[in-house]
Amino acid sequence: MIRFDASRSLWILETASAAFVFGLARRGSSVDGFPQSRLSGEGLLLQTWYGPRLSDPSEYPEAVPEPGWASFSTPASLSPEIFPAAGGPRFGEPSLACVFPDGVRDSALRYRDYSIDGEKLSVFLDDSAYGLEVELEFIAHPAWDLFSRRAIVRNRAGGSAASSSGGSVLIESLLSGAVYLNRGGEYRLTHLVGRWAGETRIERCPLGEGRFTIDSSRGFTSHHANPFFALDAGASADEDSGDVRFGCLAWSGNWKISFERDNFGLVKISAGYQDRDFSIPLSSGQEVASPSFIFGFTRGGFGAMSRALHGWQRSALSPSGSELRRVLYNSWEATAFSVDEAGQTALAEKAASLGVELFVMDDGWFGERTNDRAGLGDWTVNRKKFPRGLGPLIARVKELGMEFGLWVEPEMVNPDSDLYRAHPDWIYHYPGRTRTEMRNQFVLNLSIPAVEAYVFDAMHRLLSENDIRFVKWDLNRSISEPGSHAHGHPRDANIRHIEALYRIMTRLRSAHPDVRFQTCSGGGGRIDPGILAYFDQAWPSDNTDASDRLVIQEGFSLIYGAHIMESWVTARKNWLNGRELSLEYRFHAAMAGVLGIGENLSHWNEEEAAAAKGLIALYKDIRPLVQNGNLYRLESAERTSFLYAADDGSRAVLFVFLERNRFGGRMPPVHPRGLDPDARYELVQRSPAAPLFSPPSAEIAGRAGMTLSGAAWTERGVEVPLREDHTSAIFEFKRSPLD
Ligand code: DGJ
């Protein structure tokens, strides 16, 4: 619910239990000896509340500028301005920085008016001297205690001003805006760090005075950081309780989120485009929008934060919503580039016999692709490998009762390809400078309209000519030398690239509504709420070691739901670290997301195939809980446990992994969350098949076979007698029919 309190000039945005409030400072703060209004803070738009919803809205404070401090800190630089534009006495991170046609770099935005349309609020600001308009757009997502916001900058000038930038306003920095935490708290930042094969690992650190930035300048979201943060005061939050303020950015190109703690204890968070090597010329009549910044508040700790984000992704963001994702097979770890009709057909037959629903052929099927040195860009079937085209393989896959999926990497080109030979100027590069190859490939410059058209046409043709229902869209290098000579202004190429990608996806999805898409970037390099508006699921990492994967999946789950998190069962001995894990452990870890199989199925003996078949059947049974339930992370370290509970409290599935048994002895019980305290649940061991419990056992905690109330299970916990390293189990809580 959004409303404007005219008597106090306050905009109040409320969800079920959170509120974000800002207002127009109607009076300035008195600053001795500094009479100008620019110094007093009068007329600024200031955040006055970001936290729990109050039952009496008249208690939200109104906007009053902070007093200045000596001649160095002015009200404008000390007050929580929701969209500080570079200009006047401001010294922190600007949400907007621009150069006007006459060279002036001083923005003076003043509030003009606002409009409210249901859950959407637009507040308009003007710099009337230059005809610059900024629309601050806010959307409330009441059910999820989330808000999203973005800024749209419009050049409404007459368009005749002559200048070095040709009459354009040059946007040098554009963020979605700023949000603030209460002055004076000792805040702890939670964010995700990583690298290839080690993405989305949770890092926590105190926010000290100064500026700390997480970002990507690689041209895409990156493996190294994810555009997300969570902040709690004094490390007071845990999984189940505590105030957490959090946010994420819907953008798949260069991005940044900065955290500034000023000398008076005010914490400011600003999120938007990365402004390194960035500028956008805005000529008269043009506009540019910042990415959407999604932010929220919860009193329920990090667990409630994740559940809100997952629910929002399923209900509002994801193009296929809560549609159940298929169990898939992927050929990459089995056959790498050596794909052909006979080999893939044999794998497909084995996969179908196990209950797989989607067969995905990975890299190697096109152009002159026998390794990673050739072929990218030539999206036609390799006739040496598939003399009859893809048709017979697809037909067989369908006959086996599965859908067919295909790997592509459309934004890339190998120097050894027909495409590159025909269009060497289609890649990012600077004339006369080295064109850096990574993985023997270049990046196509999608900001060139002809390149965008080529990529769309190639993918559209592929999907039109073949019965493909799933596309794995990969991206295996960073963008370097981001030159673009398509339109004379290379420094907006990254934005144009990502906008072109989003456009291509919009067109592909509308032309092929039955096709589902996976975002992949050498693992989890391009996962963010921007891309997830177009892609149904994601490949979190090339690291398929189940033990490492549990760590990566935990970090992933902070932000993204299990319906997005594809995970494969691969070889017993992992290619990355040589670790050997049981089939069961590997399956259980992959069953925590969208289950896939990546092992060469001809390596499985009958017993393994039978076990796999049973586990796939089990997965299908618990899949609605995993993919659409509510996640409760229970513990992670030597033992990792988590639970997915159905919305209606009827069922919950508990996963337990013993990573390492130190010093022997009995592990404490696992305490479930998310059960209806008043309902009665029977605990059923779903996997492994042989009972873990050998009665009699200590009855301090509950154990499989028992029926207890949700409240009792939560308090007593579940006895899980796993003893050996890397063993695991899956249990189900079934609400008793009497309830
Ligand atoms: C990187 C991906 O993450 C892998 O799964 C695989 O698709 C390879 N690329 C293929 O080149």
Image: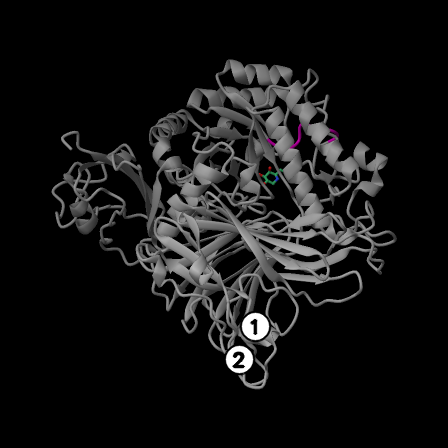
Looking at the rendering, the stretch of residues picked out in magenta corresponds to 362-368
Q: Which residue is mark 1?
A: 76
Which residue type carries mark 1? Ala
> In the displayed structure, would residue 510 be above or below residue 261?
above
Q: Is residue 367 magenta?
A: yes
Secondary structure mostly seen in magenta is loop
Residue positioned 79% across, 35% down in the render: 450
Q: Which mark is residue 68?
A: 2
Give the mark nearer the N terminus: 2 vs 1.
Answer: 2
Q: Secondary structure at mark 1?
A: helix
Viewer-proximal residue among 69 and 607: 69
Q: In what quadrant does ligand 1 lie?
A: top right
Residue positioned 83% across, 50% down in the render: 488
Among the 4 quarters of the image, the one containing residue 33: bottom right
**What x and y, as percent, mark residue 418?**
81, 32
Which residue type carries mark 2? Gly
Q: Quadrant of the C terminus?
A: top left
**Residue 563 appears anywhere in the view:** no
> In the displayed structure, would residue 372 be above or below residue 357?
below
**What x and y, as percent, mark residue 88?**
65, 72
- Direction from residue 81 to residue 15 in the image, left or right: left
